[in-house]
Amino acid sequence: MPDNDHGEHLTFAFALSGGAVPRVGCIEVVCGSMFSGKTEELLRRVKRARLAKQRAVIFKPKIDNRYDEVKVVTHEGFGADSIPVSSASELLERVPPDTAVVGIDEVQFFGEEVVAVAEKLADRGVRVICAGLDQDYRGVPFGPVPRLMAVAEYVTKLHAVCTRCGAQASRSQRLVAAEGQLFVGGAAAYEARCRRCFVPGVAVEP
Ligand code: ZN
């Protein structure tokens, strides 16, 4: 059984030993541009953990209310129960004691403190799966994500398809004039672009 299946930490030693072997925690980061399938990948990993009878909870920042207040909703509209929290410390407080897997969606919107929280949980034996944007609309590393990638055991970079040329897209092109990283705006305000087609900042279409 490979330990690393496309950046996903899969260990069954804990279950196979009946709990005699301590569960080893870890941090996984699933990152990429918008429309790259990060949330779908987070949900896929959580679903597999639940199939293995592991208790898994998903958190997301309260700021992302594009579609639904209480669900992690992907752009394709699939949902999963999640707990909206306003800070990383609130997230830590709300992890149930017997939790094996903690998913964090839109992790870029948490402050730097989410790095310490993820490490604390992983040190406790929790598998922490963080999904989020690695770059903002300017192409600049986004909030806590670069540090999370550095301390993570596993990093998965997903790609979207460039809407201009069809190449692998790694950037989120903002299409409307708005300032600040925290502008959410929904899918209509962004498109995925490759390095060549990306224009840092706002690209208002002619
Ligand atoms: Zn392109």
Image (cartoon, helix red, strand yellow):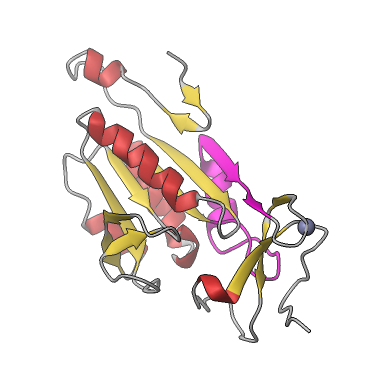
Q: Residue at x 22, y 58 (%)?
A: 93
Q: Quadrant of the N terminus?
A: top left
Horizontal placement of 138 versus 57: left or right? right
Q: Quadrant of residue 62?
A: bottom left
Say if residue 156 shows up in the picture.
yes
Query: What residue appears at the point 50 percent right and 78 percent down from the top-left corner?
Result: 185
Q: Which residues are magenta?
A: 133-161
- Taking the image in four quarters, ligand 1 sits in the one at bottom right
Q: Position of residue 126 (x, y in %)?
A: 31, 38
Residue 45 place in picture, x, y as percent: 38, 38
Question: In the visual, does 2 lie left or right of 52?
Answer: right
Residue visible at 77% across and 65% down?
198
Q: Which quadrant of the structure image shows residue 20? A: top left
Q: Is residue 90 visible?
A: no
**Where in the figure is residue 99, as x and y percent of width and height?**
21, 41
Q: Confirm whether the magenta stretch covers residue 150.
A: yes
